[in-house]
Amino acid sequence: MDFNSSSGGGSDLHNNQHQLQTDESKPLLGEVSASGPPDGNKMGASLYRRALLHCNGMRYKLLQEGDIQVCVIRHPRTFLSKVLSSKYLRRWEAHHLTLTDKSLASATPIGYMENAISYSAIEDVQLLSWENAPKYCLQLTIPGGTVLLQAANSYLRDQWFHSLQWKKKIYKYRKVLSNPSRWEVVLKEIRTLVDMALSSPLQDDSIHQAPLEIISKLLSENTNLSTLEHENIIEAIAPLLENNHPPPDLCEFFCKHCRERPRSMVVIEVFTPVVQRILKHNMDFGKCPRLRLFTQEYILALNELNGGMEVVKKFIQSMHGPTGQCPHPRVLPNLVAVCLAAIYSCYEEFINSRDNSPSLKEIRNGCQQQCERKPNLPLRLMRTSPALGSQEVTSPVETRIKIVNSSEIHVDLERNNVANQKLKGPVGGSESEPSLIDCLLVSPACSTMSIELSPQADRVLVCYVEILKMLSDYDDWRPALASLLQPIPFPKEALAHEKFTKELKYVIKRFAEDPRQEVHSCLLSVRAGKDGWFQLYSPGGVACDDDGELFASMVRVCNNVHILMGSCYKTKKFLLSLAENKLGPCMLLALRGSQTMVEILCLMLEYNIIENNDTQLQIISTLESTEVGKRMYEQLCDRQRELKELQRKGGPTRLTLPSKSTDADLARLLSSGSFGNLENLSLAFTNVTSACAEQLIKLPSLKQLNLWSTQFGDAGLRLLSEHLTTLQVLNLCETPVTDAGLHALSSMKSLCSLNMNSTKLSADTYEDLKAKLPNLKEVDVRYTEAW
């Protein structure tokens, strides 16, 4: 057969082959492929080469390895047609070839494939077939010969052809773009690379990821680009990002652009579909945190536009969709993850500053940071007391000095009160996890720290709290959002920041107003020993700024749903949790006229939640202090005669007012019932002043009074000394009393324990009190002039 003849079919084949090589051999940094098509006139009519055009619709998976027949022919190029037309072709070898990033290698490096073939050594890749012996072959032109690869069928041959072409081109781009010279040429080659990836018939994640990784590496190694070059590169690679996540280095490049050019049109036109895809399809930001950072910076860039949060709101609406149900289940978790990370970053400076602070369990157990609080020094007592198990030592100044813990007096005063307020069910062991709210109140890292964010951090905080508000407005998202926020995922520095908790209050209120149980049940703690939003926004909680209005709303919706469900067990369980953790706030709100709290207290009595008689009497007195409470309590008494009998026995012997109680609350409570039997009253950490002394002197049986950390002053102290002459224990720690009021205590001859820690006591007054109070056995004068 004459291989040099020029038939019409050969001419068409030559044109198709030339078109294929034109499409597959784009310039690389100005370099044009040196290998041209062989002369079609020399190939003959019987030999034809077929070019696969992309328009035929065929798609292939990128090969990484596979079995194929190999034959290597060492010959001058002009003799190739004669060799192929010969009757007996050289032997074929079966090899398992692997397409690595740099070369074509065999799993068994023997025979023809003893040495791997580098992609840089392959001058051309062509499709071959001839009529007499149809073999599905590829021709790889290498220096000094030709490598023939024979596949089992035409589809597999075409798959090998496109895979080899792709590997060869990517290898060249990776090598050439690693050392760029002129950026205008680089931009041209980036566009060519993107076009090649988009037009490739191969379907594989790496087809679009490989160019992105090459460009990402290029940008990470060349950081001194102008803004215009930034935008040109982003626009060039935009088509690849429609169906692919950007690599980490590229995310960093995008973040930088969002920070430096937030008003650039690239942010809206290019980044928007990229971020939308991330939010819809990302499964775990933990595996690629830079995707989350890029999304965070993109939203902040939207907030910098003229529309501000309105633009962000429209973006959130576009992510949710126009219907009442968002079709993309991953959008909400991803948005929440971005918000939590952004809010955390606002307080990172404060979080890092607590590295040496005690852990939560240490804080709960009293191990506090010494540099922030007064040292825990021993308490000096005038006489020993066998009632307290203390350590006794000898001193040259005083023959017997008693060493006790600084908080022992206060703990001793409250111990019996706590013991007598035991409720049904265990409260929790000593090894239970520390309460978050207690840690916030006790930890010096939070309670004494002034949270003041930088202007930039403040803008970030406002932006992402507003996004949480937007998310809570969607009915279909609210259950999942409440579940994600139930374990309180924010740092305690954020919870100690008044601005944050005030802004977040809207979200919690939306949860409380939702009638669905799966929503408002997330306000409770996720498990026993952990505090939830219910505790955080309760009166006395660090986030409460509305005198318990939100707390009452949360209690009402939770209790109403339990009652409507008809579940007595769930109602009792809910009331028991309230009684164990929030009985004080409930009574305080009932004392101020909250009908919801009045109903709750009545239910506690009706279901016999409270076992201690003193606590029951205190609840009864609270109910009788308001008109609505009195009416509901009378209705309850008609159903339960035992409560009336209990009230006739007299008032409680012990009483503790909730924190943040005022003089008016105390007056309203004491005027509502009989407190003639009251012996122990604790007003510690309340807001009472000297004005409450008018009510205290009406308690003839009072023996122990705790005024720790109140605003009780000299005027009230003088009034107490005139009327409560039988008082035995008085705690004035951290009150504003001075010598003018403390002098009056000399008339209270029954005093046996007196705490004047951190007051304005002078040494002369202290000596005078020691001389005039013969029964005084325990006294605390630390951090005073007398110490």
Image: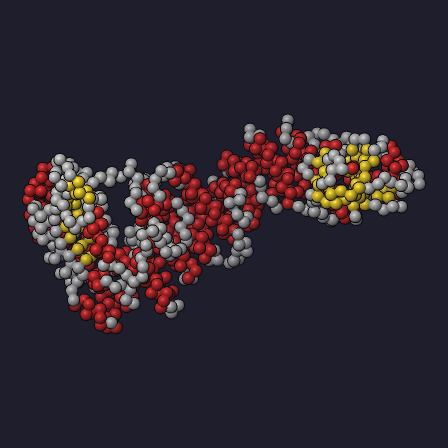
Q: Nearer the viewer, residue 466 or 687?
A: 687
On screen, residue 560 versus residue 661, left or right, reads right
Does residue 611 sit above or below 158 in this rendering? below
Left or right? Give the position of 129 relative to 664: right
State the residue in front, 506 or 429.
429
Q: Quadrant of residue 213?
A: top right
Instruction: Report which quarter residue 195 is drawn in.
Output: top right
Residue 279 percent coordinates (x, y): 53, 48
In this view, the residue in front, 786 or 18, is 786
Q: Quadrant of the N terminus?
A: top right
Q: Is residue 753 left or right of residue 151?
A: left
Q: Position of residue 23 (x, y in %)?
A: 75, 38
Residue 521, percent across and down? 40, 59
User: What residue occupies the far top of the structure in this picture?
Assistant: 181
Instruction: Give percent across and percent down for residue 613.
Output: 21, 63
Name the residue at 74% across, 31% down.
32
Of 755 and 485, nearer the camera is 755
**Residue 432 visible here:** yes
| Residue 748 in view here | no
Residue drawn where x is 34% and y is 62% of the image: 574
Task: Tell which residue pokes out farthest to the right in this image.
Answer: 1
Q: How many marks?
A: 0
Q: Is residue 183 above or below residue 275?
A: above
Instruction: Give the quarter of the figure containing the C terminus.
Output: top left
Query: What colour-coding does the image apply?
Result: secondary structure
At 25% from the left and 64% from the top, the residue drawn is: 611
Residue at the image point whose x is 78% and y is 37% from the top: 111
